[in-house]
Image: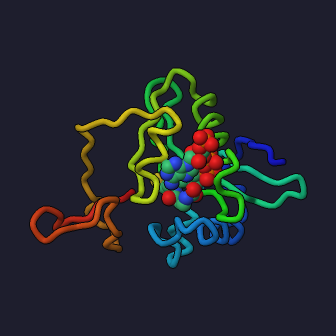
Amino acid sequence: MWTCERVAGAELDVEEVLALYRASTLAERRPVADVERFARMLAGANLVVVAREEDGRLIGISRAITDGAYATYLSDLAVDASHQGRGVGRDLVRATGEAAPQATLILLAAPAAVDYYPHIGFTRHDSAWTLQGPSDPEARPSHEPPSPANAPRPTRG
Ligand SMILES: CC(C)(COP(=O)(O)OP(=O)(O)OC[C@H]1O[C@@H](n2cnc3c(N)ncnc32)[C@H](O)[C@@H]1OP(=O)(O)O)[C@@H](O)C(=O)NCCC(=O)NCCS
């Protein structure tokens, strides 16, 4: 069995979290090769929940940013592939929501998870928009496959 706990992202072991991103496959869609930037992603997120096995093994993470009152942006949800399908992701989302119960959870689904979020209660929003940072050093893969006609600037998911 696992437990979910809110933690300070800055206090996490960056290499341990990197290993989880790789084990979940989310590493394919995040700038994991830039460890300094990845460490800032952890430290800058003010609502981080981790799932650990009884022996302390890190098996899941929810990395979000919240104002605590209105909006929570859930940027990364990752569960070790060896533990997927057991309810860990649902538990992480529940704990993230409970940490800021008046706030709406907002996210961009990765392609492999587009059917996941409606399954656990999310509602699709047809007016979500993104604008890539002017100094983003990486052209990240889009949450939707880019096409030459409509995706000159990739977005994240
Ligand atoms: C997506 C992810 C976080 C889901 O976590 P999980 O712990 O495997 O999911 P859960 O066990 O909580 O699943 C809850 C329910 O959703 C279903 N489900 C799980 N993954 C699903 C998927 N990709 N699509 C549709 N349904 C899914 C489960 O079957 C379960 O259904 P049930 O309650 O009817 O039994 C996890 O698979 C993962 O880390 N994937 C790779 C990284 C990724 O794509 N993250 C999302 C970034 S936006």
The location of residue 21, given as percent across then percent down, is: 60, 66
What is the x, y in percent for residue 146? 23, 67
In the shown orientation, is residue 124 left or right of residue 48? left
Image coloring type: rainbow
Please give left or right for residue 127 compared with residue 32 in the image.
left
Please report the residue visible at 51 percent of the width from the left and 78 percent of the height from the top. 33
Query: Residue 105 at what x, y percent from top left?
Result: 47, 34
Residue 11 vertical placement versus 3 (above, below): below
Relative to 21, say whether 10 is above or below: above
> Residue pushed farthest top?
102
Query: What residue occupies the far left of the structure in this picture?
Result: 149
**Residue located farthest toward the right when viewing the structure as drawn:** 55
Residue 99, quarter of the rendered image: top right
Q: Is residue 47 visible?
A: no
In the rendered image, the quadrant that contains the C terminus is: bottom left
| Quadrant hosting residue 22 | bottom right
Using the rendered view, name the quadrant where residue 148 is placed. bottom left
Residue 31 in view = yes
- Comparing 44 with 140, the one in front is 140
Residue 92 in the figure: left or right of residue 104: right
Q: Residue at left 28%, top 66%?
A: 145
In this rendering, the answer to whether 150 lies above or below 48 is below
Residue at left offset 67%, top offset 40%: 91
Query: Furthest-bottom residue in view?
Result: 33
Q: Nearer the viewer, residue 36 or 152?
A: 152
Q: Residue 135, how many percent across, how many down? A: 30, 67
